[in-house]
Amino acid sequence: MRKTLEDLYYGNITPCDQQMVHGSELKKAMDRVTKCEEQLLALLDEESQQILVRLIRSQQTINSITATENFILGFRLGVRLMAECMDNNDGDINFGGE
């Protein structure tokens, strides 16, 4: 536990900074998106390219906000589960003879 707290204090825990596994389904999907984006940009005039870039950046912002919110919700759920596990007197039989 101490190591985790120290890592958190010193900024060594960065859940949003993860590497994709080479050859994974996520990496393959990201490669397909990149290829499609490049193909679309080649087909569009400059004004349309700007619209596409704005669309892509807006979607990236949405994805980032969603990832942050899901992380927070998951963390809160984990804490609630841990807190509930600590309640020894919530049933008909006491745990540990208490």
Image (cartoon, helix red, strand yellow):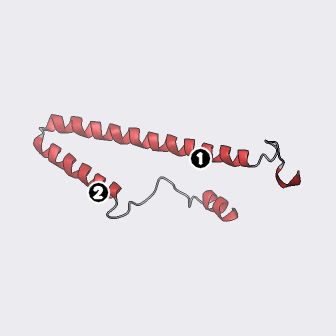
Q: Secondary structure at mark 2?
A: helix
The amino acid type of the residue labelled 2 equals Lys
Residue lying at the far right of the rendered structure: 98
Position in image of residue 64 (x %, y %): 42, 43
Residue located at (78% from left, 45% from top):
87
Q: Residues within 10 Å of mark 1 (few under 14, many from 20)?
A: few
- Front in this rendered view, residue 34 or 49: 34
Position in image of residue 70 (x %, y %): 50, 42
Residue located at (76% from left, 49% from top):
86
Q: Which mark is residue 23?
A: none
28 in relation to 56, above or below: below
Q: Earlier in the sequence, mark 2 or mark 1?
A: 2
Mark 2, residue position: 28
Q: Residues within 10 Å of mark 2 (few under 14, many from 20)?
A: some
The amino acid type of the residue labelled 1 equals Phe
Residue located at (36% from left, 42% from top):
60
Mark 1, residue position: 75
CA–CA distance in space, label 2 to label 1: 28 Å
Residue located at (57% from left, 58% from top):
11
